Amino acid sequence: MTFFLSWDRATWRAVGVTAHLVLVSLLGLPEAAVKPSDLDKPEVQQWFDRNYAAVSPWLPVSRATFVAGVAGWGQGWMAAREVLVAPSRAYAQLAGTSQHWAMFGSVPQSSATFFVEVKRGGRWERVHQGRFGPARWRPSWFDQERVRSQFNLFVRKKGREDWDRMVPVMAQMAWADFPDATAMRCGMQPVAFPAPAVLARTHKVEQGEPFWVTALPRPGSALSNP
């Protein structure tokens, strides 16, 4: 105890910074992107097909054994990771630095993209279409990492309360950039990706019925039903 009391302010600061870096860095250990319940998804099975084909010439096991081995190793790693990051998670929650580091486990076969439309001259005009097509209104704002992560939740139909708070903010930006617009609306457009060979040939994705479509009239506009 006397040893610690002998430390000066610079030493305590160095210890604190080092502890912070170590605890936060532990949270960067790879996190599971595929859960056991995801193993039957077509895109995950395709991942197993590709990787099994790559290792099968020198790994004399069946595909089922390969899948079970990879899944078992992943579950074992996550159990060990939980033990390692437990102190870090408690510290991160206290310091307000919590963040999930999971990456995409596979390329999804379906997703959704965000769109914005403004009404001018009685007609709707699409001014933003996510990353599909040339309509890219305010790209620097929509490309911010925190904004993109929020839309990633919307793709999975999560965070509806955040959506309801975000739409009026985007409406204010629309009124500033499109002074002749009488209304704006936005929503999420489901998309389905065809097989790679088809996508390479057509450069098109299939679009589904939009959801969470929200329309707002310009304040003071005579338009009561946008």
Image: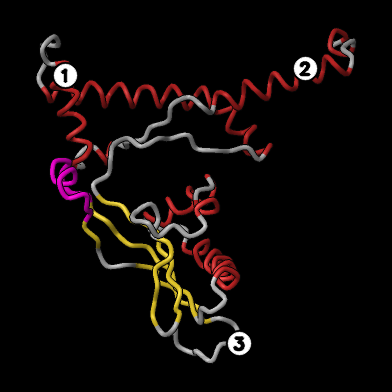
Callouts 1 and 3 close, C-beta under 8 Å? no
Residue 168 vs 10, above or below: the answer is: below
Magenta residues span: 193-205
Measure how far apart labels 1 and 2 are at the Cα level.
47 Å
Residue 180: % across, % down: 53, 79
Residue 60: % across, % down: 10, 11
Residue shown at the point (60%, 87%) measured from the top left: 220
Q: Which quadrant would residue 219 be assigned to in this image?
A: bottom right
Query: Considering only order in the chain, which callout, 3 or 1, is on the residue closer to the N terminus?
Result: 1
User: Please, what is the three-letter code of the amino acid marked with disc 1?
Assistant: Ala
User: On the rendered structure, is 126 left or right of 108?
Assistant: right
Measure how far apart labels 3 and 2 are at the Cα level.
58 Å
* Numbered disc 3: secondary structure: loop
Callouts 1 and 2 close, C-beta under 8 Å? no
Residue 51 vs 145, above or below: the answer is: above
Measure how far apart labels 1 and 3 are at the Cα level.
63 Å
User: Please, what is the three-letter code of the amino acid marked with disc 3?
Assistant: Gly
**Which mark identifies residue 220?**
3
The residue labelled by disc 1 is 54
Q: Nearer the viewer, mark 1 or mark 3?
A: 3
**Which mark identifies residue 71?**
none
User: On the rendered structure, is 48 left or right of 153?
Assistant: left
Query: Considering only order in the chain, which callout, 2 or 1, is on the residue closer to the N terminus?
Result: 2
User: Please, what is the three-letter code of the amino acid marked with disc 2?
Assistant: Ala
The residue labelled by disc 2 is 14
